[in-house]
Amino acid sequence: MTMKHISSADNKNIKLAVKLADKKTRDRESLFFVEGRNSTLEVLKRPELVTSIFMDDSRQGEYQELISEYNHLEWYSVSSQLMKRICQTETPQGIAAIVRK
């Protein structure tokens, strides 16, 4: 597994994550977005449903164990600024995922 770095808000994965805040998009794409450590750990119990995981690049050490355990999944490192853009919470926990319904 190679961690892919996303630096642009124009990246298709970032755009999709932002659009998933909209219910119509979630229904149309049959995807949803989870953010935060606990929610991400919960969806990782069904890794076959996880399409991609976003991680704040400044917190990579914090999640290194998860990265190693689920290295077959698509991992993206993003800046803190991009993480704030895709997350709805005021202070993101540095990890989020796109999951199939």
Image: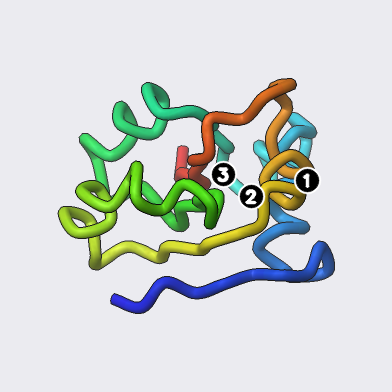
Q: Mark 1 packing: few (<14 Cα in 10 Å), some, or many (20+)?
A: some
Image height of 59 relative to 37, above or below? below
Q: Mark 2 packing: few (<14 Cα in 10 Å), some, or many (20+)?
A: few
Q: Residue furthest right?
A: 10
Depth-wise, is mark 1 or mark 2 nearer the camera?
Answer: 1
Q: Give the x, y percent position of residue 54.
A: 52, 52
Q: Nearer the viewer, residue 7 or 39?
A: 7
Residue matched to label 1? 19
C-alpha gap between disc 1 and disc 3: 12 Å
Image height of 71 relative to 70, above or below? below
Residue type beneath disc 2: Glu
Residue type beneath disc 1: Lys
Q: Give the x, y percent position of residue 88.
A: 73, 27
Q: Mark 3 packing: few (<14 Cα in 10 Å), some, or many (20+)?
A: few
N-terminal label among 1 and 3? 1
C-alpha gap between disc 1 and disc 2: 10 Å
Query: Does residue 41 appear to the left or right of 27 in the view shown?
Result: left
Q: Residue at x 83, y 69 (%)?
A: 10
Residue matched to label 3? 30
Q: Residue furthest left?
A: 69
Q: Residue furthest bottom?
A: 2
Q: Residue at x 36, y 78 (%)?
A: 2
C-alpha gap between disc 2 and disc 3: 4 Å
Depth-wise, is mark 1 or mark 3 nearer the camera?
Answer: 1
Disc marking residue 29:
2
Residue type beneath disc 3: Ser
